């Protein structure tokens, strides 16, 4: 029998067995703020149930398994027939099934559906971010399909179902279905107007045969895909089913799976179309216009997903420092570490608050809110997703060497952290989209200024930042080269306005001082020492 050389102490317990939703004060407050009071009790119950599942040791283990056993491509069966299937570890299916059953694809037909789903998506990302891809694509496909009432009537009930059916069979035989998307091609990337995939009309009206490729195809085991291809009248949106009505497989030739930096549990593929059957969605030649609402919805999910990753990283860092002792006391009580944790907590709360505000605008659907989204979505997508990677790396450093070890879970968060900045249009695409909104839709700027104006007079640093933004907008010389700067300022001013209105004073004060007032450094942990940083950290602490 091996003897014990010493007793191990000063190690924090695992962060498990807790309610991921209920212990996130910023998220709970946002839900309470944006939901109708009559919906609140039911929504809080659902979200707390999801939060307890997300915080359980069982689901945390499933997440580890899904990432340690990434998907594998099987192009042929043992008889040599093409099957073009992707095999996943059982843990992937358990997690994805849980996400579907929790309503993470069911926002569109429910009162307050977007806010409820957004909060759930933030929670669920903290368990395992990879299965967020098919959940997001399925959710986002609905507005594009609604351009064709007949298609929407057929597919929307399946996409918003809470039943996960993983079998590849005709969609009419399924109680629930998932969607993917294929837009980019090798020669064009984000410039989808350079796509060369050809769509040739077939005898049946509205049907086409596609020939070409997609360089990135999300969730390739989905039941259907929205893709862009060039029809006689120009770039058009199409629905490509994986299985045809007669039960045969569509020509959906998977060439390989991407070997990605992170997001390892999720499959992203390269696919070839060779006479692939497709159904037209929207007007021929108006493909970008048809699919743009799907893109906007997935960009909101990029913001929410990054907010979830930030929250997961901050929770781990604060939890570790609450229990870990060094140099004669708890790390969380050390002034410099407290500064770091508070700075991280500010960034996380600002991301969550902004993400839920976008979801509330989606629920409202009014003209004013739609105009606000036109600027707020690309600005938020640009800024929040870019802040995710440095925050997660800093949070991992709070754990010291433990944060560099796979067992801590932090390396998985680090690998995942750049993802949302790249997907659905990288930084330059988002910044230029902000400029397009300013140039083409003056009502978007009016809606934005009205939103941030609600907080005017409450904090002089916010007032100064609003004035500075207006000054930048008055000078349009070299505006394209300044597009990133503008997008950043739009996002920061909006975050500041929301925090001034809704966050505790210590949070709003610290954010405005450091992000808008210039009293902060380039690295995390450089907040003014005179602020109430202990209160900021306390607010961010998870309760096990």
Image (spheres, rainbow, N blue to C red):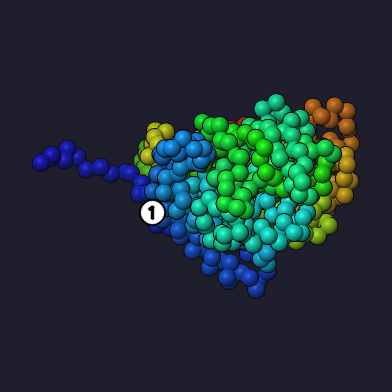
Identified at 74% across, 32% down, the residue is 195
**Residue 199 seen in the figure:** yes
- Asked if residue 244 is positioned above or below residue 366 in the image, the reply reads above
For disc 1, the neighbor class at 10 Å (few under 14, some 14 to 19, many from 20) is few
Decide if residue 467 is on the left or right side of residue 239. right
Image quarter for residue 467? top right
Q: Secondary structure at mark 1?
A: helix
Decide if residue 456 is on the left or right side of residue 248. right
Q: Nearer the viewer, residue 64 or 94?
A: 94
Image quarter for residue 492? top right
Decide if residue 435 is on the left or right side of residue 119. right
Q: Nearer the viewer, residue 495 or 109?
A: 109
Residue 431: where, in percent of width, then height? 75, 35
Identified at 87% across, 45% down, the residue is 441
Residue 204: where, in percent of width, then height? 76, 49
- Asked if residue 27 is positioned above or below residue 133 in the image, the reply reads below
For the view shown, which residue lies furthest in the front direction?
Answer: 203
Residue for badge 1: 58
Identified at 79% across, 27% down, the residue is 481
Residue 365: where, in percent of width, then height? 77, 59
The count of marks equals: 1
**Residue 117 seen in the figure:** no
Identified at 53% across, 47% down, the residue is 131
């Amino acid at each position: 029998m091996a003897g014990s050389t010493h007793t191990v102490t000063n190690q924090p317990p695992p962060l498990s067995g807790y309610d991921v939703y209920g212990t996130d004060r910023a998220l709970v407050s946002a839900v309470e703020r944006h939901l109708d009071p009559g919906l609140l009790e039911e929504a809080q119950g659902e979200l707390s149930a999801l939060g307890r599942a997300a915080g359980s040791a069982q689901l945390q283990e499933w997440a580890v398994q899904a990432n340690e056993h990434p998907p594998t491509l099987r192009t042929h069966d043992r008889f040599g027939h093409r099957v073009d299937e992707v095999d996943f570890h059982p843990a992937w299916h358990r997690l994805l099934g849980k996400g579907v059953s929790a309503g993470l694809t069911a926002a569109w037909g429910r009162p307050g559906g977007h806010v409820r789903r957004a909060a759930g998506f933030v929670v669920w990302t903290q368990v395992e971010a990879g299965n967020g891809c098919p959940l997001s694509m399925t959710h986002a496909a609905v507005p594009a399909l609604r351009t064709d009432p007949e298609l929407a009537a057929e597919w929307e009930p399946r996409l918003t179902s809470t039943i996960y059916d993983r079998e590849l069979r005709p969609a009419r035989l399924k109680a629930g279905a998932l969607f993917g998307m294929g837009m980019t091609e090798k020669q064009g990337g984000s410039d989808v107007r350079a796509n060369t995939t050809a769509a040739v009309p077939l005898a049946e009206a509205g049907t086409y045969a596609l020939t070409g490729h997609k360089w990135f195809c999300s969730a390739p085991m989905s039941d259907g895909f929205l893709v862009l291809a060039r029809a006689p009248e120009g770039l058009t949106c199409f629905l490509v089913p994986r299985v045809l009505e007669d039960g045969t497989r569509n020509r959906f030739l998977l060439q390989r799976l991407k070997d990605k930096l992170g997001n390892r549990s999720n499959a992203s593929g390269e696919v070839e179309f060779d006479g692939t059957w497709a159904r037209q969605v929207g007007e021929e030649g108006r493909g970008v216009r048809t699919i743009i609402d799907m893109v906007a919805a997935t960009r909101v999910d990029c913001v929410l997903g990054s907010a979830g990753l930030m929250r997961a990283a901050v929770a781990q860092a604060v939890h570790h420092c609450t229990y870990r002792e060094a140099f004669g006391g708890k790390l969380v009580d050390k002034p410099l570490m407290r500064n770091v944790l508070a700075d991280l907590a500010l960034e996380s709360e600002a991301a969550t608050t902004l993400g839920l505000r976008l979801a509330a605008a989606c629920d409202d659907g009014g003209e004013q809110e739609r105009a606000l989204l036109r600027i707020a979505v690309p600005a938020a997508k640009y800024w929040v997703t870019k802040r995710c990677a440095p925050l997660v790396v800093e949070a991992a450093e709070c754990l010291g060497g433990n944060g560099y070890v796979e067992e801590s879970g932090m390396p998985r968060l680090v690998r995942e952290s750049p993802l949302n900045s790249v997907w659905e249009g990288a930084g330059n695409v988002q910044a230029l989209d902000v400029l397009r909104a300013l140039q083409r839709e003056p009502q978007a700027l009016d809606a934005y200024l009205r939103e941030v104006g609600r907080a005017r007079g409450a904090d002089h640093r916010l007032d100064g930042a609003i004035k500075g933004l207006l000054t930048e907008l008055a000078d349009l010389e070299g505006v394209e080269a300044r597009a990133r700067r503008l997008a950043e300022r739009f996002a920061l001013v909006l975050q500041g306005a929301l925090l001034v209105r809704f966050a505790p004073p210590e949070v709003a004060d610290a954010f405005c001082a450091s992000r808008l007032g210039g009293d902060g450094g380039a690295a995390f942990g450089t907040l003014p020492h005179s602020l109430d940083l202990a209160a900021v950290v306390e607010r961010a602490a998870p309760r096990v």
